[in-house]
Amino acid sequence: MISIADEVNGVIISNDNFAPFQKANPWLRNAGRILGATHSQGMWVFNWRVPNPAAPTRPR
């Protein structure tokens, strides 16, 4: 899904921050690339969101 959205300059609708994929796909943090979805009073509400940066990984 991430690859397809990148290829077609698409918008992803998700409440996930895609942290494990941000390093390889920095465009995930660009404004206007991810919408968050909330179900409220019987209606779906979509808000633009910019995910928090992924936490640095520690060497294993």
Image: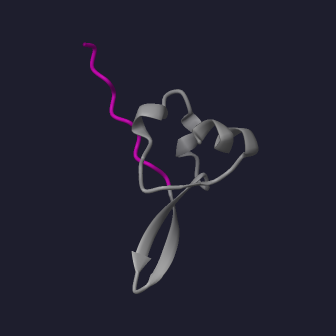
Q: How far from the left and from the top, in percent, is residue 21?
A: 48, 33
- Residue sitting at 56 percent across and 33 percent down? 25
Q: How many marks?
A: 0
- Residue sitting at 25 percent across and 13 percent down? 60
- Residue sitting at 40 percent across and 80 percent down? 40
Quarter of the image for residue 59 reads top left
Magenta part of the chain? 50-60
In the displayed image of the protein, which residue is found farthest to the right? 8
In the displayed image of the protein, which residue is found farthest to the bottom? 41
Q: How far from the left and from the top, in percent, is residue 2?
A: 58, 40
Quarter of the image for residue 55 reads top left
Q: Is residue 16 magenta?
A: no
- Residue sitting at 43 percent across and 85 percent down? 42
Q: Is residue 55 magenta?
A: yes
Examine the rendered structure and indicate whether residue 57 appears above or below residue 1: above
Q: How far from the left and from the top, in percent, is residue 50?
A: 49, 52
Horizontally, is 45 left or right of 59 in the view?
right
Say which of 57 and 13 sits in front.
13
Examine the rendered structure and indicate whether residue 57 appears above or below residue 28: above
Q: How far from the left and from the top, in percent, is residue 8?
A: 74, 44
**Main secondary structure found in the magenta portion:** loop
